[in-house]
Image (cartoon, grey):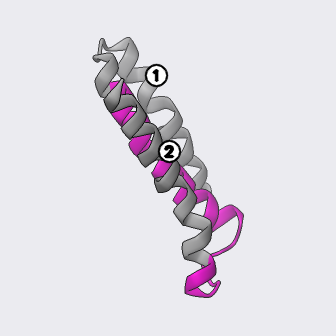
């Protein structure tokens, strides 16, 4: 469980560190999009305890993040 907390903290700190290092904003946007999916998978599996759930339920719980990120990515890409 400690590893999950550390992974979530690293996912939260990475864009901030990248911003302070001078990363381009478009790189930061895509980095945040990717990290949202990683964080969602970790949250569903460990904090919602869906690791042992039936595959359909687990997929349904994890599918919202990529769908939302894909929608936001399309909106960002078009604007």
- Marks 2, 1: nearer the viewer: 2
Q: Which mark is residue 69?
A: none
What residue is drawn where x is 37% and y is 39%?
74
| Region in magenta | 28-57
Q: Residue 36 carries which label?
A: 2
Percent position of residue 8, x then y? 55, 46
Is 31 left, or right, of 6 in this rendering? left
Residue closest to the eye, 37 or 3: 37
Image position of 5 with respect to 79: above or below: below
What residue is drawn where x is 48% and y is 40%?
11
Gap in Å between the C-alphas at discs 2 and 1?
14 Å
Within the image, what quadrant is residue 56 found in?
Answer: bottom right
Question: Label 2's element?
Answer: helix
Percent position of residue 58, x then y? 59, 76
Within the magenta stretch, is there residue 32?
yes
Image position of 23 with respect to 50: above or below: above
Percent position of residue 27, x then y? 29, 26
Image position of 61 with respect to 16: above or below: below
Is 14 left, or right, of 6 in this rendering? left
Question: Label 1's element?
Answer: helix
Residue at the bottom extreme?
54
Q: Which mark is residue 16?
A: 1
What residue is drawn where x is 46% and y is 22%?
16
Within the magenta stretch, is there residue 41?
yes
Residue at the front extreme?
78
Q: Main secondary structure of the magenta part?
A: helix
């Amino acid at each position: 469980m400690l590893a999950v907390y550390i992974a979530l903290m690293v996912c939260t700190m990475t864009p901030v560190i990248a911003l302070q290092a001078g990363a381009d904003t478009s790189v930061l946007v895509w980095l945040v999009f990717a990290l949202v999916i990683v964080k969602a998978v970790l949250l569903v599996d460990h904090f919602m305890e869906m690791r042992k759930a039936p595959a359909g339920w687990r997929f349904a719980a994890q599918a919202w993040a990529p769908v939302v990120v894909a929608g936001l990515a399309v909106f960002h890409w078009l604007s």
